[in-house]
Amino acid sequence: MSTKSSGMCLLMCAAAVSMPSLADLPTEIVIVTSSRVEKPLSTIPNTVTVIGQVELEQQLAVQHDLSTVLGNLIPGFSPSRQKMTNAGESLRGRKPLYMIDGVPQSNPLRDGGRDGRTIDPAMLERVEVLHGANAIHGLGAAGGIINLITKKPGSGLDQSIRLSTGFQTEDVGESADYGVNYSISNSFGQSDILASLSYRSTGIAYDANGDIIGADNTQGDTMDSESLNGFIKAGYNWDDQRIELMVNTYDIESNNEWVSVPGDVSEGIPSSAVKGEIEGEGARNNVTAISLNYTNDEFLGHSLRIQGFRQDFEATYGAEAIPLATFQDPAYGPDLIDQSQNNSEKLGMKITLAKDDIAGLPVSLVYGMDLLEDKTWQALIQTNRAWVPETRYLNYAPYAQAEFTGVEKLVVTTGVRYEKSKLEVDDFTTLASYGSRFVEGGKPEFSETLFNLGSTYQLTNAWRVFGNYSEAFSMPDVGRVLRGINEPDQSVESFLDLTPILTESTEFGIEYSGNDVKAQLSYYTSESDFGERLQRGADGVYTVNREKTEIEGWELSTQWAVTDLDLLGLRYAQAEGRYDSDDDGRVDSDLDGTNIAPDRLNISWDRAWSDAFNSRLQVNYLFDRSVKNNSGTTINEFEGYTTIDLSTDLAALGGTISFAAQNITNEDYYTYYSQSSPNDIRNFKGLGRSFSLGYQKSF
């Protein structure tokens, strides 16, 4: 098989990759996220993006930030905030569910905007992204699923080391990044193990004018930070069975040595930062995920998978130099400086049984049960006050998914999932800034039956059409709702804003898969009669508004192998979102940038200059967007921008040397979120031109 033809089999599944590596890749992509068992991509009636390890390494050479990687390859995903937080980042206008090997990382009970920063991307083998609302993995997948698949042990002894550094020419020393990753894996008869350790130190960031970019002291910043990630995966095989343990612990912390300097939105002055100290602890994310997996391919005629998991999540938010009004309390005197810490402890189990040819019919069935306990709270750690009371969420969900293949070229899938949940909250009193309201606790229960139906039809060898309807069940940001209660005589038992969110999604798509060209076009809608929308307060603290929301959009992805050595890619996403601002049952106002991504165009050119040298040039263009209220008045304008990145890799010195440049034209711009929710403290410019150099060797 030629390099050109073998490469084209993957083009709709991921961004372009270096040509010489394609010959070793399979002709049919198999994923696990969409149905919980391995399924060929061509039988799935959804848009799915698979980002392989080569693509990951190529993108990480430019910027070691997962949100940036996702945005570069999936234009329907929001632009990166370029900070520790990923608050406001969305997929198809709604929050996605992040997972690591199927273990949920998102925290829907108190969404602190850190679920995209729970693992170093160096630990990943690939990323599977299922676009659109679905209930395959339960709670929180209103926008889709981002499943981070970690690396597996090899068949023998294998070691690798990667060194990387980055800098900006404004101040090479102050801006310098340093990173190192070492991994070792081996197999011993029926056993195997992989261990990996990563460390990264990140310097200060400069904008296109050579000025220091403002530090986000509260939400957290990746500049002037250090991170450490330890990872172990060990397994044992016997007969048709396997047991596997995965442990990942990730810690990123700000050095807390730079103080944010407010800008002036009205005067066009960006936020900046100066050396200094802030009271309290630096912003930090400390996350540990553990899973124990058992598989049996011959269990009473079924394939059985059982996953038990635990996640401990601790996100510390830094203090502001200027006291926040929300934290003020006369009992502690004036000008109180405080900071919050968001905690979540998850314990769960996923049971999956799969069987083909039910009763001799062309029907396969996947069914099982999910169990989850999530305990979440948010404290003010300098004064030991409770901002969000301890909230305990209990959920069980039986499900069944069937696939029919009895008609040639047609695959029909349908499924049902029953969600049964209970929320437990004790009596509590809100902060003084909310009126010190006493709120009666309670144990409200919720239940919902969710359905999905989809089909894919192979029109010819090259053309395929697909369509689906799916539903997703998620809780609102319970903590944000509870802490914001400012009316008397409220009870958790009857508080309407705690009602779960039911999101209904439809999608229709057509795909062409030829030898030289791959293309996919899809149209989708996403509706929720009682959704949620984030709204920023005067002091920068967000509240949740429960409102009807509707989103629709288009996604286009094309890849063209121009020659055996050249591959061109084009990806485009357009979305419109509206909400009901006056509770009359009709959507009448535009969603802003904290709730939906801008329209975006990604263009890429990959070339294999030789067997040893490859390059990728990519362009990201974000379109202008105007946000209008229910009277048609424009209340916000986003001015789009264009960034261009270059990455190269050269086989040399017994390994691979990579060199990359981000924003090579030194585009001067304010980030999407700074423009969408303008305020003086977070009037952040985007990253100016930066360079990175890396070396990787396997032995």
Image (cartoon, helix red, strand yellow):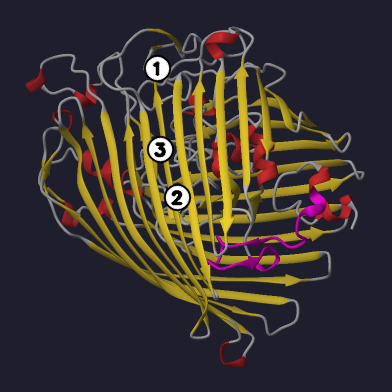
Q: Residues within 10 Å of mark 2 (few under 14, many from 20)?
A: many
Q: Position of residue 573 (x, y in %)?
A: 65, 44
Other residues around mark 1 within 10 Å, as few (<14) / some (14–19) / many (≥20): many
Badge 1 element: loop
Q: In the displayed image of the protein, which residue is found farthest to the front? A: 189
SS assignment at label 2: strand
Examine the rendering and report whether any part of residue 160 can be seen.
yes
Q: Is residue 558 above or below residue 333?
A: below
Query: Is residue 518 something that shows in the picture?
Result: no
What is the three-letter code of the residue carrying label 3?
A: Gly
Distance of mark 1 from mark 3, alpha carbons?
Answer: 18 Å
Please report the residue visible at 49 percent of the width from the left and 12 percent of the height from the top: 270
Magenta-span inclusion, residue 96 = no
The residues bearing labels 2 and 1 have C-alpha atoms spaced at a distance of 29 Å
Q: Residue at x 15, y 37 (%)?
A: 430
CA neighbours of label 3 inside 10 A, class few (<14), some (14 to 19), many (20+): some
Residue 681 - label? 1
Toward the viewer: 191 or 120?
191
Q: Residue at x 17, y 32 (%)?
A: 434
- Looking at the image, is 291 positioned above or below residue 37? above
Residue labelled with disc 3: 113
Q: Is residue 472 above or below residue 198?
A: below
Question: What segment carries the magenta color?
Answer: 22-44
Task: Work out whether residue 628 or residue 674 is closer to the camera in this orientation and state it.
Answer: 674
Disc 2 target residue: 549
Which of labels 1 and 3 is toward the front? 3
> In the rendered view, does 603 fall on the left or right side of 403?
right
